[in-house]
Amino acid sequence: MDTKALRQLSYGLYVVTTVCDGKMNGQIADAVMQITGGERPTVAVSLNNNNYTRELAAKSRLLGISVLADGMDRELIAHFGMQSGRDIDKFAAYPPDGVDEQGVPYFTDERFCAWMTGRVIEEMPMGTHTIFVVEITEGETLCGKPLIYADYLAAKRAPEPAKKAAKGGMRCTVCGHIEYGEMGPDYKCPLCGMGPEVFEPVAAEAEPVAAPAGQTGGMRCTLCGYVEQGEMGPDYQCPVCGMGREVFEPVG
């Protein structure tokens, strides 16, 4: 099977949020679709079973969806998509712009074009993921157009503008981000979420690489750039962004 055919399906990108016993969490998701309209509209949201958002939503039966607009904010996407709410409070750095009557957080700033919240009325286990059927009870249309997943991937693959690396700068070997500040033991790359162990020194006046080179024969994740050299079984998940093997492509 040519799994690249799946990439022709149209997706958006969303910050999916929930709250449970006063604990808020959110994650990046692309598998969101409307099921029904009318007076009781419903949407389906697919979340990885390992994700903390899925765990909380299964208990509280509450979900929110903030639709990312096409002015892509890589740092926000990395913040909500490449680290776990079990380890940090994601809303400490990105406080929500509002909460609904049940306390579910959502965003309304210029990085988003809509938001909606509701209650889970059904859930279906689907192997590595769970599909939540959400009856939407609140929502609002904002300005802008939605970010399309294919455009996000194209932007990630595009070379970043060249910039001079200050002496002592450190480059992430996964995504190419250059950090000029201090990097403590808990530091995480703002683009790919990796720790300081994957950074290497950058010589003064050096130009950053346009994209991770990887190694010949490996498989590169088209979402985060991670290169896998080992075997990838049917249940494989990228150790950086959590996506399955269907988003990987061969590295020349």
Image (spheres, rainbow, N blue to C red):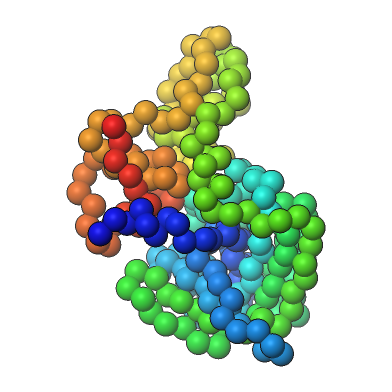
The answer to whether residue 196 is visible is no
In this picture, residue 204 sits left or right of residue 72? left
Relative horizontal placement of residue 12, taking residue 249 as reference (left or right): right
Residue drawn at (34%, 69%), measured in percent from left and top?
A: 128
Percent position of residue 54, x then y: 49, 71
Which is more toward the observer, 174 or 30? 30
Q: Is residue 51 above or below residue 137?
A: above
Whether residue 63 is visible here, answered yes or no, is: yes
Quadrant location of the C terminus in the rendered image: top left
Q: Residue at x 51, y 12 (%)?
A: 206
Indicate the quadrant containing the N terminus: top left, top right, bottom left or bottom right.
Answer: bottom left
Residue found at the very far left of the displayed protein: 231
Displayed quadrant of residue 190: top right
Vertical placement of 5 versus 41: above or below? above
Residue nearest the viewer, comparing 5 with 133: 5
Q: Position of residue 10 (x, y in %)?
A: 52, 61
Percent across and percent down for residue 155 are 55, 40
**Residue for point 69% across, 54% down:** 69
Could you tell me residue 159's position as x and y percent? 53, 29
Furthest residue to the top? 205
- Residue at point 45% right, 44% down? 224
Tally of numbered discs? 0
- Viewer-nearest residue: 219 or 171: 219
